Image (cartoon, rainbow, N blue to C red):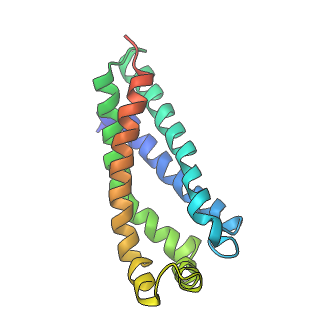
Amino acid sequence: MNKYKVEIKWAIIFFVVSLLWMVFERAVGLHDEHIDKHMIYTNFFAIPAILVFVMALLDKRKTSYGGKMTYKQGLMAGLIITAIVTILSPVSQYITSEWITPDYFKNVTNYSVETGFMTREAALDYFNMKKYIIQSLIGAAVMGVVTSAIVAIFTRRS
């Protein structure tokens, strides 16, 4: 367990940052009055997400490898963080949907129907807890692997 202390720490930090991002999105109205802009601005979460991975791999390089880290070591650390974040993603989705922004599914369903983007049946089928948990699991895994592979290039040092 001590071997993965850095990865666990940064996965928890990522989890907290993602919840804070959801609080921010709700506070600025992206989950209700400005829901029409949500699809654009939610993508800016990539910035803090990548920063967390950079800081995590730099921390891993410093604390576990004495300032030197190969690409493979960085990639493995990133993949471990990704695995933990992926495991935590349903919890994050539940907290977001139940406590941070409980009206989001209703709001996005109504918006999608009102704008003609989807029928009510299609929107109800797409915007719900089960689908979002599945999406969060897949998204966390895919984006984590890609981010780990790229960030490990820039954080390696021999």
Q: Where residue 146 sits in the image (x, y, percent)? A: 36, 40
* Residue 156 seen in this snapshot: yes
Left or right: 52 in relation to 77: right
Judge whether 70 appears above or below 96 on screen. above
Seen at 44% across and 23% down, the residue is: 155
Q: Where residue 30 sits in the image (x, y, percent)? A: 65, 67
Quarter that holds the N terminus: top left
Quadrant of residue 37 within the rendered picture:
bottom right
Looking at this view, name the residue that lies furthest to the front.
Answer: 116
Seen at 33% across and 51% down, the residue is: 141
For this rendering, which residue is in front, 50 or 67? 50
For this rendering, which residue is in front, 54 or 118? 118
Judge whether 10 appears above or below 30 on screen. above
Quarter that holds the C terminus: top left
Q: Where residue 40 sits in the image (x, y, percent)? A: 59, 59
Left or right: 144 in relation to 18: left
